[in-house]
Amino acid sequence: MFGAHYPSMVRLAGLLGADDPEDIAQEAFARLHARRSRLRDDGAAVAYVRSIVCNLTRNRLRHLRLVRLRPLEPPPAAPSSEHAVIVAEKHQELLAAVDRLPRRQREALVLRYWLDLSGLEIADAMGVSPGSVKTHTSRGLAALGRALKEDA
């Protein structure tokens, strides 16, 4: 059946305006194959494939129309290799400075700025009061600022 009707299904999809009529016809036959056991009349298979081709073409044209209505934004400019190296180096300096902080200050800063948790969530995670979280965060930021200033 595929060999006998494939060219006519490709022509049908092309005449209906499909930009990829071969793909539409192949997809139609694949869907027929997947649902072949549900067909009550084998003689209806050609009509079934034809309706699938029409539906797939209609869906494809609708999709293309919507895509063309929304112009694509140009991709953001890629940073240079030098920029990537500088950023990686600064990240390494920051991570090294964070690693040198006392454990509680490091925990408070990581939970606050990397995981974006609230003061109450941090207090719960660390098992301390919200006031202690504020103290550890404040002292950690101050120590981190001093450490990064010394590195610069």
Image (cartoon, helix red, strand yellow):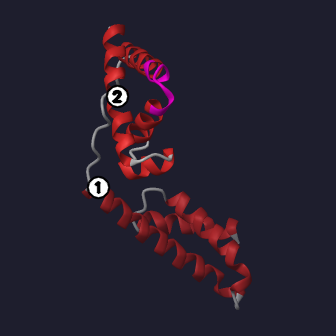
What is the number of the mark on residue 139? 2
Quadrant into which the N terminus falls: bottom right
Q: Is residue 47 magenta?
A: no
The percent coordinates of residue 11 (x first, y second) are 50, 65
The percent coordinates of residue 93 (x first, y second) are 42, 16
Vertical arrangement, residue 72 with respect to residue 105, above or below? below
Image: magenta residue range:
97-104
Which residue is more in the foreground, 115 or 53?
115
Horizontal arrangement in the rendering, residue 131 relative to residue 99 (left or right): left
Residue at image location 29% in from the left, 47% down from the top: 72
> Which residue matches tag 1?
68
Q: Is residue 98 magenta?
A: yes
Which residue is more in the foreground, 66 or 138?
138
Residue at image location 25% in from the left, 58% down from the top: 69
Circles 2 and 1: CB distance less than 8 Å? no
On the image, which quarter does residue 50 sit in? bottom right
On the image, which quarter does residue 114 sit in? top left
Horizontal arrangement in the rendering, residue 90 relative to residue 103 (left or right): left
Query: Looking at the picture, which amino acid does disc 1 mark?
Result: Arg
Query: Looking at the picture, which amino acid does disc 2 mark?
Result: Arg
On the image, which quarter does residue 22 sit in? bottom right
Dot 1, how many residues are within 10 Å of its Cα: few (below 14), some (14-19), or many (20+)?
few
Residue at image location 74% in from the left, 82% down from the top: 37
Q: Does residue 118 appear anywhere in the picture?
A: no
The percent coordinates of residue 17 (x first, y second) are 39, 64
**Which marked residue is nearer to the observer: mark 2 or mark 1?**
2
The percent coordinates of residue 26 (x first, y second) are 60, 62
What's the magenta bit mostly, secondary-structure-wise? helix
